[in-house]
Image (cartoon, helix red, strand yellow):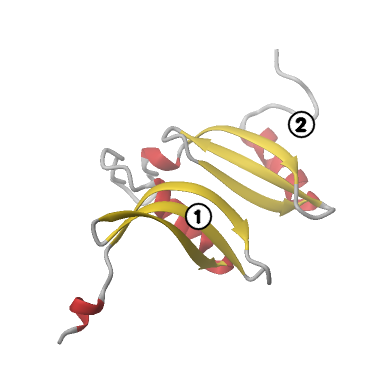
Amino acid sequence: MGMEADKVKVSVEEVKESNPSADGTSVVVETASIVDGELRDTSIEVREADAPAVAVALLNTEADAAKPTGPNDLPDAVQCLAAGVVHGAEAGRVRLHLQFESGQVLPVEMSHAAAVALCHGLGEHTATPTGQNRK
C-alpha cells in the first residue's frame, strides 16, 4: 500500500480560537474542519515558528481569493481591514487583533518595545506623526 492511502484529507472550514500551548512552544488552533468528508471539531497544534505561515495559509483558503501576480503582491485575504490592541497574556506584552474581510481575526502578541516600534513604523509609512490624532 502506498503512502497516499495513509493520508487524511483535512479542510479547515472555520477557525474558532487560538491559544498558546501549555509549554509555550506552540499555538493550539481550534477549528471546525472537514476530515475525510465529515465535519468535525479539531485541534491543530502548530509550532511557534510555523504559526505565521499557517495563519496566512488559513486566511488564503477562500476560493475567490486573488492570486499574487508578482513577488510583492499580496492576495486580498491578507489585506487587513481593521486592527485593535488589548493587554497581552503576560505583563509587558500587548495583543494585536487583525480583522480580515473574511471575518477572521488573527491575534498577534508582542512585547511593549515591539508595539512601540510598530507605532513609529506606522506613523512613518502613513505620514502621520505618532502621538497626534488625524482630523
Residue closest to the eye, 123 or 79: 79
Residue closest to the eye, 135 or 77: 77
**Residue 124: in sight, yes or no?**
no
Q: Quadrant of residue 66?
A: top left
Up-down: is 44 above or below 73? Answer: below
Q: Quadrant of the N terminus?
A: bottom left
Nearer the N terminus, badge 2 or badge 1? 1
Q: Amino acid at mark 2?
A: Thr
Direction from residue 19 to residue 33 in the image, left or right: left
Q: Position of residue 131 (x, y in %)?
A: 80, 29
- Report the residue at 25% width, 62% height from top: 36
Q: Which numbered circle lies on residue 134?
A: none
**Other residues around mark 2 within 10 Å, as few (<14) / some (14–19) / many (≥20):** some
* SS at badge 2: loop
Q: Position of residue 84 (x, y in %)?
A: 66, 34
Does the CB distance between marks 2 and 1 fall below 8 Å?
no
Residue closest to the eye, 109 or 135: 109
Q: Position of residue 122 (x, y in %)?
A: 66, 37
- Report the residue at 68% width, 52% height from top: 109
Q: Quadrant of the C terminus?
A: top right
- Report the residue at 40% width, 44% height from top: 74
Q: Which residue is mark 2?
A: 130
Q: Amino acid at mark 1?
A: Glu
Q: Which numbered circle lies on residue 30?
A: 1
**Other residues around mark 1 within 10 Å, as few (<14) / some (14–19) / many (≥20):** some
Residue lying at the far right in this picture: please name it. 91
- Report the residue at 70% width, 46% height from top: 95
Q: Quadrant of residue 26?
A: bottom right
Q: Position of residue 86 (x, y in %)?
A: 73, 39
* SS at badge 1: strand
Q: Quadrant of residue 125?
A: top right
